Image (tube, helix red, strand yellow):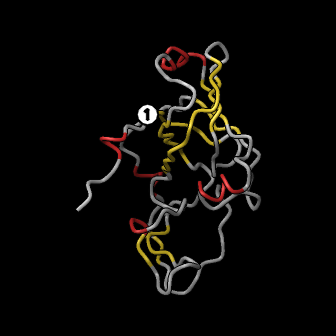
Amino acid sequence: MVEDRDHREGEIRLGFDPADRANAGVTFVGFIRSDWSRGKSPRNITQGREAGGGNARIELAPDYLPGLQGLDVGQPIWVIYWMDRGERDLIVQYPRHSPEPRGVFALRSPVRPNPIAMAAVIITSIDNDAGIIGIDTTDAFDRTPVLDIKPWIAGIDVPPSG
């Protein structure tokens, strides 16, 4: 059970726990390891970099080690992770940086129906035998489950200018 935080005026909760309505299965391919914990973590990747990166790395489960083939040090990747310690039933939030409440889909908050996050990071080291990928930073708590890793590709992952 997630520890409930204080809620602000204007916030709206769902009338159900989204976890009870799960209609797809996922598997964790590994875990993010970091120096971060509740109350002692950056609020986003930029703050993570400013704080020195948090000794960030991904430890893959042994069955997924062959998936490292083709990754290189210096390469940007997307890490998709499951914020397993976040609330899931708050649909409108009142962030401190906003003058008014905002819907969860307009925010990068970890409090969301499906606690999925993604971050573009740089590979700093790879140990193929141990399945450890060093990354330049994270904003995730230690032992946050990893759902997937994908290469960041400039021609695909940058929105068109217009």
Q: Quadrant of the N terminus?
A: bottom right
Q: Residue at x 46, y 18 (%)?
A: 70
| Front residue of 3 and 16 | 3
| Front residue of 162 and 66 | 162
In the rendered view, would you say 10 is above or below 18? below
Q: Residue at x 51, y 81 (%)?
A: 98
Q: Secondary structure at mark 1?
A: strand
Image side of residue 66 versus residue 35, left or right: left
Q: Quadrant of the C terminus?
A: bottom left
Q: Residue at x 40, y 68 (%)?
A: 106
- Type of residue at label 1? Lys
| Front residue of 161 and 29 | 161
Image side of residue 26 versus residue 157, left or right: right
In the rendered view, would you say 99 is above or below 82? below
| Front residue of 54 and 5 | 54
In the rendered view, would you say 146 is above or below 19? above
Q: Residue at x 55, y 59 (%)?
A: 110
In the rendered view, would you say 27 is above or below 80? above
The image position of residue 122, as x and y in percent, is 56, 38
Image side of residue 119 versus residue 58, left or right: left
Q: Which residue is mark 1?
A: 150
Mark 1 is surrounded, within 10 Å at the Cα level, by few (under 14), some (14 to 19) or many (20 or more) other residues, namely few
The image position of residue 91, as x and y in percent, is 44, 69
Badge count = 1
Q: Residue furthest left?
A: 162
The image position of residue 65, as x and y in percent, is 55, 17
Q: Which quadrant of the figure has residue 136?
A: top right
The image position of residue 160, as x and y in percent, is 26, 54
